Image (spheres, rainbow, N blue to C red):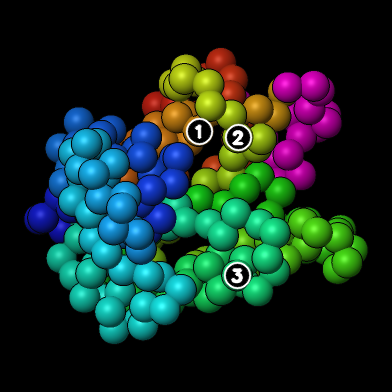
Amino acid sequence: MADNKRVVIIGGHGKVALLAAPKFRDAGYSVDSIIRNPDQKSDIEERGANPVLLDIEKATVDELREAFQGAAAVVFAAGAGGGDPERTHAVDYEAAVRSIDAAEQAGVQRYVMVSYVTADIDVDRLDQDESMYPYAKAKHDADAHLRASGLEHTILGPGVLTLEPASGRIQLVDREGKIDGNEPGEGESDTSRENVAEVMVHAVAHDAGVGEKINFYDGETPITEAVK
C-alpha cells in the first residue's frame, strides 16, 4: 500500500460514494472525490472529502493518471444511470477502462470496481434489444478489462440497491445471484448501499477480496468474516 493513505473515488457524488467517503476518513484515509459538477462540491466537503473537478467522460488517461498519482487506491463508483445506451457505454465502459489504465500507469495497485451481482452472465442471457443489455455489456466488459490488468482488484457485485442503513452483515451469493443454489425470494436480493460502502472500505483498508468478485446481498454474516 502507498505511504500516502489517500483514496480516489470516481463518481464521488453517487449515493454509495457519499456514504463511503466518511467511512474511509474514519479508517484513516484522506479522500479525493472526482465530480464533474461544481455545484456538488459542498456535498463532498460536508463528508470530509476533497472535491476534484474532472469530467470522466472526457478525461484522458493522462489526466486521470495525474489525479491518481500517489494514491493508495482507486474506487470506481460512477455510473450513467441507464436510459441512454451511448452514455452508458461512455461512462460504465470507456471511462472505467481509462481509469484502470491510468491507475496502472500511476503505479496505484489497489483498485475497487462497483459492478453488480450478475454482470458476469447477463451479457449472454439478455437479448440485445432489452433495455438492460447496454448496461450489462458495459459492466461485463469493464470488469473483464480490470481482471486482465495487473492491478490488485476487487469487484463488488451487490444485488438490488436500497437506502436502508448498513447492518454490517452480508450474504455471499454465486455468479447467478443464487443463495445456496436457490433463486432469491422477494426482498432477499436487497443490498443496502451503505453495506456496499462498508464492503468497499473494508476491502481497501484490509486488502480483502484481492483478485475476487464479491457477489452479495444483505445477510447475517459480518462483513469482516465474509470478505477476507
Q: Identify the residue shown where x is 36% and y is 83%.
A: 60
The amino acid marked with disc number 3 is Arg
Image quarter (top left, top right, bottom left or bottom right) of the N terminus? bottom left
Q: Nearer the viewer, residue 92 or 145?
A: 92
Q: Quadrant of residue 73?
A: bottom left
On the rendered structure, is 204 left or right of 126? Answer: left
Callout in the foreground (3, 1): 3
Locate residue 140 relative to residue 39 in the image: left or right.
right
Q: Residues within 10 Å of mark 2 (few under 14, many from 20)?
A: some
Q: Residue at x 80, y 21 (%)?
A: 186
Q: Which amino acid type is marked by label 1?
A: Arg
Q: Nearer the viewer, mark 3 or mark 2?
A: 3
Of the residues shown, which amino acid type is indicated by label 2? Leu
Q: Which quarter of the picture shows residue 151?
A: bottom left
Residue, disc 3: 87
Whole-percent x and y of residue 163?
Answer: 53, 27
N-term-proximal mark, 1 vs 2: 2
* Foreground residue among 35 and 164: 35
**Quadrant location of residue 19?**
top left
Q: Which residues are magenta?
A: 171-187
In space, the residues marked 3 and 1 are separated at their CA atoms by: 23 Å
